Image: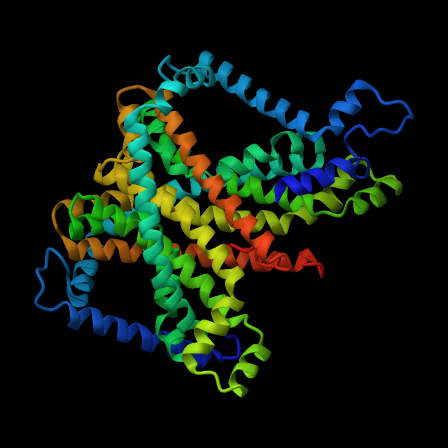
Amino acid sequence: MLSSDSAWVRWTTVLVSALLGAAVWEFGTRGLNPAVMSPFSDTVLRLAEMLRSGELGAGAAQSLGLFFTGLSAAVVTALPLGLLLARVRLLRVAFDDYIALVYAMPMVALIPFILSIFGLDFSAKALVVFLFCFFPILYNTVEGARSIDPELIEVARSFRSTEWDVWRDVMIPGAFPYAMTGVRQAIGRGLVGMVAAELFLSASGLGQLLMISARNFDTAGLFGVVLIITLLGAWLMAVGQALENRFTAWRGVKR
Amino acid sequence: MIREQANAAGQSFALAGGAPGPRAGHKSLWTRFAASTLLVKIAGGVFLLVVSEIAVRLLAPAYVSRPSGVFRVLPQTLTNPAVLSGAAITLGAVLQGSVVALVSGMVVGLLMGRIRLVDRLLRIYVDGLSAMPMVAIVPLLTIWFGFTSWARLATVIFAAFFPIAINMNSGARAVPQGYLEVARSCGASAWHTLFGVTLPASMPYLLSGIRLALGRALVGAVVAEFYVSVDGLGYFILFQTRTFHHNEAFVAVLLLALVAVGVDALINGIIRRYMPWYRAGERKR
């Protein structure tokens, strides 16, 4: 990233490139069949209409509810489990390759199973988001806790730290930055899980809006929803990145 | 990555504390077991299999896949022509799409990395679209390409493009200034500086980008097959679960997992073999 730019230059750049993009979108698509490609102005009008009628707001709220349910469940379970695996070497050696396997696996492939076992209700969709989020956090926490210098634990031990002290002063601070990398990845994957769950399980939220507008060849509406999803995604990813940056300082000089 | 560190950990685990260390002179059976990384891993795998077998038997309906069921159908599913052709189709689409994404992503990333104006014009689009969950684009692609395999190819390209462009971009920025100065003072053309100096120098970044891209391309192909219902491994999974053949479907899931892990291992191997000095950024993203 070029960081030499001042804030003023950065914002002008964003503004100019956004305007150029809008202009290309607007004038490059005039005269095309509106069912195939809708110009920028139509998309904005349709977007405003959807916002006014409240369907977009309600859909986004529903989707975000689903997303945060799954994400927070994953954080609450994967973090302690990751630390436990990191602390108990035997457990870690026993399971880390399997965790890496599931971490690399395309989770979407499990959606049909969840559909046919758990049905269509909210908890099934939350389970999808949970599964998408769980393994990045677990994997990164274990990876991070492994990078804790064993000597630190030894020193803590020789100063008669209790097990609880070791956790509080060494394990948790040491693994936390990596866990945050996991959370950032989980946010990205969880968004995919959210939209996939809403498309492939019972339709709801933004996924449902996508599906309805695609079926009606309402391309302006479809673009509008995609735009909103993109903005939500960019915002959440930025939050994740900020979280990660906030804690990377803890990693110290080694990396 | 994991394995090599696990081995190292296996030798130094007395230091790690917590686990019972071989403090006494004579070694009990337990300490010898705990010191053998392979045995512990196998035991962990067996434990996971047994637990899932019991859990599924007790809690889930009979049609749900469980380890014993998957083992039983493994031979016949792996020789099932539908699985084989499905795997070939899906992987073919992933490969085709990734090649298109690789070429275009490389060009865009290189230009963004070396020419400031291009970076300024494109940055918000590349960053924004890469943050977008790619599933959301599939309905739009079905409008443009119909419910055909073209929609799948487009999804794969879309999914794979951004990791490559972004990594290529940061790689091109990370090229040491000295290389560029030498190229310049030797009178290298802009073309040569871009493809002869910058590109090779940012190879490790590109490779991590390719690894990410292939993973996402695989997800994209499966998602597209679910939505579009064109033949492939993803559609095989969808069809088999709908007809309550969960065991057969799970074999296909295992195949996908194998491909994903194989790609990771391949790229990591290439980086370790040909660029052993390169470590930083491997964890990034």
Q: Is residue B178 above or below residue A220?
A: below
Instruction: Please count the marks in the image.
Output: 0
Query: What's the colour scheme?
Result: rainbow
Q: Residue at x 45, y 12 (%)?
A: B57
Q: Is residue A89 above or below residue A180?
A: above
Horizontal arrangement in the rendering, residue A85 relative to residue B35 (left or right): left
Q: Quadrant of residue A219?
A: bottom left
Q: Quadrant of the N terminus of chain B?
A: top right
Horizontal arrangement in the rendering, residue B123 relative to residue B21 (left or right): left
Q: Is residue B175 visible?
A: yes
Horizontal arrangement in the rendering, residue A156 relative to residue A140 (left or right): right
Q: Residue at x 35, y 23 (%)?
A: B79
Q: Is residue B86 above or below residue B59?
A: below
Q: Residue at x 45, y 56 (%)?
A: A237
> In terms of depth relative to the viewer, which is nearer, A242 or B58?
B58
Q: Residue at x 47, y 62 (%)?
A: B167
Horizontal arrangement in the rendering, residue A244 relative to residue A56 (left or right): right
Q: Quadrant of residue B5?
A: top right
> In terms of depth relative to the viewer, which is nearer, A254 or B150?
B150
Q: Is residue A65 above or below residue B209?
A: above
- Give the x, y percent position of residue B81: 29, 26
> In terms of depth relative to the viewer, which is nearer, B206 or A72?
B206
> In terms of depth relative to the viewer, which is nearer, A225 or A82?
A82
- Give the x, y percent position of residue B224: 27, 42
- Give the x, y percent position of residue A218: 13, 52
Residue occupying the far right of the picture: B25
- Give the x, y percent position of residue B278: 61, 59
